Amino acid sequence: MADAYANGKKCVTVKAGEAVVFTADIETLPGAGKVTAAAWDYEKTDDFSEFIPFEKSGPGAGDCGITPVGSI
């Protein structure tokens, strides 16, 4: 399961050129493996080929709050 946020909110309106920080909370089922990558489709093109490194910050195995390194 994954919940995605922009500037910490589910929906945000920003001005052109204003920085937006994307984060997500991801949880996997016990024994289902771990998150190894995250991809964002900023332009709704269905192109997920650009991967952004992320930092794991979850409280336990299977939980992973991710913060992309950088913003658009």
Image: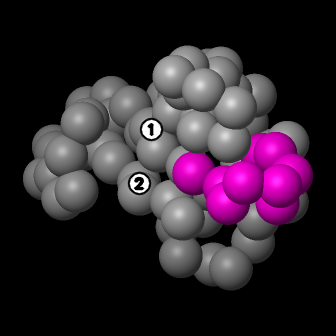
Q: Secondary structure at mark 2?
A: strand
Q: Earlier in the sequence, mark 1 or mark 2?
A: 2
Residue at horizontal 75%, vertical 71%? 47
Chain part drawn in magenta: 27-35
Q: Is residue 39 visible?
A: no
Which amino acid type is shown beneath numbered disc 2?
Ala
Q: Nearer the viewer, residue 19 or 28?
A: 28
Q: Nearer the viewer, residue 25 or 31?
A: 31
Q: Nearer the viewer, residue 18 or 37?
A: 37
Q: Quadrant of the N terminus?
A: bottom right
Residue at horizontal 65%, vertical 20%? 55
Q: Residues within 10 Å of mark 1 (few under 14, many from 20)?
A: many
Q: CA distance from mark 1 to mark 2?
A: 6 Å
- For this orientation, the residue located farthest to the front is 30
Which amino acid type is shown beneath numbered disc 1?
Thr
Against 6, residue 52 (above or below) is above
Res 6 label: none
Task: Report which residue position mark 2 lands on.
Answer: 4
- Determine contact: label 1, label 2, CB under 8 Å: yes
Q: Quadrant of residue 17?
A: top left
User: What is the x, y in percent for residue 54?
Assistant: 68, 27
Against 19, residue 12 (above or below) is below
Task: Report which residue position mark 1 lands on.
Answer: 23
User: What is the x, y in percent for residue 56?
Assistant: 65, 23
Residue at horizontal 13%, vertical 53%? 13
Q: Is residue 9 visible?
A: yes
Q: Residues within 10 Å of mark 2 (few under 14, many from 20)?
A: some
Against 68, residue 25 (above or below) is below
